[in-house]
Image (cartoon, helix red, strand yellow):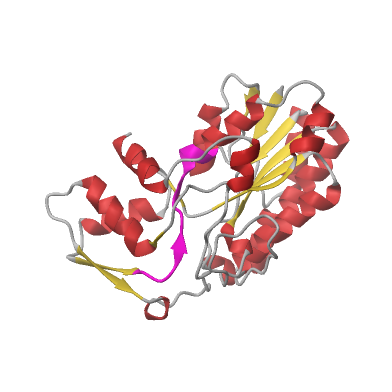
């Protein structure tokens, strides 16, 4: 099986490139070779590689900047995945695409299931939902994996920001009224590899039975302030800053955030595999 992996230098793509080893011939062009804002380039790469499976973690992820660049966010997060799906259909290929908790408005107190109505409240969320819909409209074999609060030891993410600020400030003011489940990028990659390894037999039948939308998020729940506390506990710094939980209104940002980003991964757990508790995954990440 030939696998085309986008965004191979990003935090999820970097882990996917390693987790998918042995499951196929992986082609992972860099951004210079496959920039999702250049649709002609995307089309040309897919036609040259002729993959059996496209794995697409690449995305426009600057949530606040997207409010100022809605066209670019929509181009990368919606039009490019739609084009990938169209090219995949011509090759009879399948697609695994990653989406986000931000497709929901965050008003639900319990974790969101795949059947809950979407209602994004910012440009980023709308662009990611449009990407989901573009892939679904083409009608190819696909998996859409929604995840939340992604972190790792590479790139730009909340974990690395907290570790940096902990060295610079005596106090950290962190939002304490938004809820979610921090999800390690390696968990996302390993679960994806587990799924790909199970594609066997009559592939058309496998995709018919297993394709669709799944939530892929660590187990448990916390707030950004609670996540910060656990990061610092694992970091075991000689001197840790004080953490002061604040409200969302005390930390205004250009893009509104959902009050709850909790996703129920029960469907994925029933069909494919279990998922780790967020504190345990964080401990393993920081130990590694």
Extreme-bottom residue of the structure: 249
Taking the magenta stretch, the answer to whether it contains residue 47 is no
**Residue 6 in sight:** no
Extreme-left residue of the structure: 238
Q: Residue 91, image x and y in percent?
A: 84, 32
Q: Residue 270, image x and y in percent?
A: 62, 39
Which range of residues does the magenta coloring cover?
A: 175-188
In this orientation, which residue lies closer to the viewer: 251 or 68? 251
**Residue 241 in the figure: left or right of residue 53:** left
Image quarter of the C terminus: top left
Taking the magenta stretch, the answer to whether it contains residue 177 is yes
Determine the residue positioned at 67% across, 69% down. 119
Corner quadrant of residue 130: bottom right
**Residue 63 in sight:** yes
Image quarter of the N terminus: top right
Extreme-right residue of the structure: 90
Q: Residue 126, image x and y in percent?
A: 67, 65
Determine the residue positioned at 77% across, 56% down. 133
């Amino acid at each position: 099986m030939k696998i085309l992996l986008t965004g191979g230098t990003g935090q999820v793509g970097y882990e996917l490139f390693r987790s998918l080893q042995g499951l196929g011939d992986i082609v992972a062009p860099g951004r210079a070779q496959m920039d999702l804002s250049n649709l002609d380039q995307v089309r040309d790469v897919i036609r040259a590689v002729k993959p059996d499976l496209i794995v697409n973690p690449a995305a426009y992820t600057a949530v606040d900047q997207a409010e100022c660049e809605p066209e670019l966010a929509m181009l990368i997060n919606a039009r490019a995945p739609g084009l990938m799906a169209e090219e995949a259909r011509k090759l009879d290929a399948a697609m695994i695409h990653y989406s986000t908790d931000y497709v929901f408005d965050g008003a639900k107190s319990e974790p969101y299931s795949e059947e809950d109505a979407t209602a994004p409240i910012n440009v980023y969320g709308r662009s990611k939902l449009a990407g989901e819909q573009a892939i679904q409209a083409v009608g190819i074999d696909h998996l859409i994996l929604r995840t939340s609060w992604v972190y790792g030891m590479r790139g730009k993410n909340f974990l690395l920001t907290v570790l940096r600020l902990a060295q610079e400030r005596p106090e950290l003011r962190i939002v304490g009224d938004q809820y979610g489940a921090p999800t390690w990028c390696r968990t996302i990659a390993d679960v994806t590899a587990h799924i790909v390894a199970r594609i066997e037999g009559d592939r058309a039948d496998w995709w018919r039975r297993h394709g669709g939308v799944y939530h892929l998020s660590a187990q448990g729940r916390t707030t950004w302030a609670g996540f910060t506390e656990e990061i610092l506990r694992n970091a075991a710094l000689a001197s840790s800053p004080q953490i002061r939980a604040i409200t969302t209104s005390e930390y205004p940002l250009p893009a509104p955030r959902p009050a709850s980003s909790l996703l129920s991964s029960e469907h994925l757990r029933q069909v494919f595999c279990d998922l780790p508790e967020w504190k345990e995954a964080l401990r393993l990440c920081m130990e590694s």
